Amino acid sequence: MAAKQKKVIITCATTGSIHTPTMSEHLPLTPGDIARQSIDAAEAGAAIIHLHARNPEDGRPTPDPQVFMEFLPRIKQGCDAVVNITTGGGHGMSLEERMAGALQARPEMSSLNMGSMNFGLYPMLDRYPHFQYEWERTHLENSRDFIFRNTFKDIERVLKELGETHGTRFEFECYDTGHLYNLAHFLDRGLVKPPLFVQTIFGILGGIGADQENLLHQKRIADKLFGDDYHWSVLAAGRHQIGFVTMGAILGGNVRVGLEDSLYAYKGKLAKSNAEQVKIVRSILENLSLDIATPNEAREMLALKGGDDVGF
């Protein structure tokens, strides 16, 4: 079984690299928007803020460390949430580009995808007859012939250069059952150490589907592989977001929401902010008589190095 915990960690993924400006006017794109929405999400109850960067001119995903540095200090000054910086980056970025922001920032936590996969965004093309920027159409279409690369060598490099060198711990993103076994491989080699923070992800085209049976299956396999040496978390794409995280919480897991994963608050209603999604899931958790972890409680649960030992 996953580690027994008295409180639920809410992670909020504020912007990501999947959705594009045309899809929602509420998606934060500029450093100011990302900082403000991150702080608001923390005030609403998110203990961890998961962050990507965007080109402020056109909203394109960017790996530029200088863009990260335009909003990271503001977030640190405005709240005490754990800052979690992507190493997944965006479609078409090299591993060096994907790591650049995290290596400069030396955060308490970073995401780390546990295997290569197809990552299909192109079905969203049919939903939008026109795009605000031409890059959006290309971004989605290119995913038809794209492999999101995360080889064993790539993972080893991130673990060494970011984890071993800077003391950053990881949100291990597992999009399929094989990714759980990949993580177990690194645990067996001693390259990762408990407590693990295992983020099981459902509903991305190319990964495991958003079926309730799959959620239960992923939990069973993770329990078998990691025993009580891990904290389990759930995220689901799009319309599956709230239902799946609720089911995960009932089963003893942590939850992730945010405009990276879904643009909606309810069916047919765009979320006006990341904080709105955090408030929705917090209300659900509290109505289930579950307590919400503070940032410092999340730090203790996940054995993080603390907010004073970062590069921003």
Image: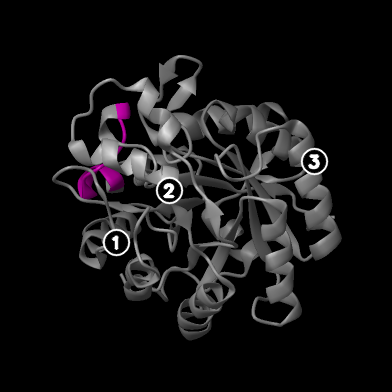
Q: Residue furthest bottom?
A: 165
Closer to the camera, 226 or 4?
226
Q: Residues within 10 Å of mark 2 (few under 14, many from 20)?
A: few
For marks 1 and 3, the one nearer the N-term is 1
Residue 63: assigned label: 1
Q: Amino acid at mark 2?
A: Asp
What residue sits right under mark 2 in the picture?
Answer: 145
Image location of residue 61, percent across then percent down: 29, 50
Q: Amino acid at mark 3?
A: Leu
Q: Which residues are magenta?
A: 23-34
Image location of residue 211, percent across then percent down: 71, 32
Q: Please state the total of marks drawn on the protein image.
A: 3
What residue sits right under mark 3 in the picture?
Answer: 216
**SS at mark 1?**
loop
Query: Is residue 33 magenta-colored?
Result: yes
The answer to whether residue 258 of the structure is visible from this angle is yes
In space, the residues marked 1 and 3 are separated at their CA atoms by: 35 Å
- Marks 1,3: beta carbons within 8 A: no
Residue 12 as seen in the image, left or right of residue 215: left
For marks 2 and 3, the one nearer the N-term is 2
**Residue ID at (35%, 45%):** 142
For marks 2 and 1, the one nearer the N-term is 1
Closer to the camera, 135 or 304?
135
Q: Residues within 10 Å of mark 1 (few under 14, many from 20)?
A: many
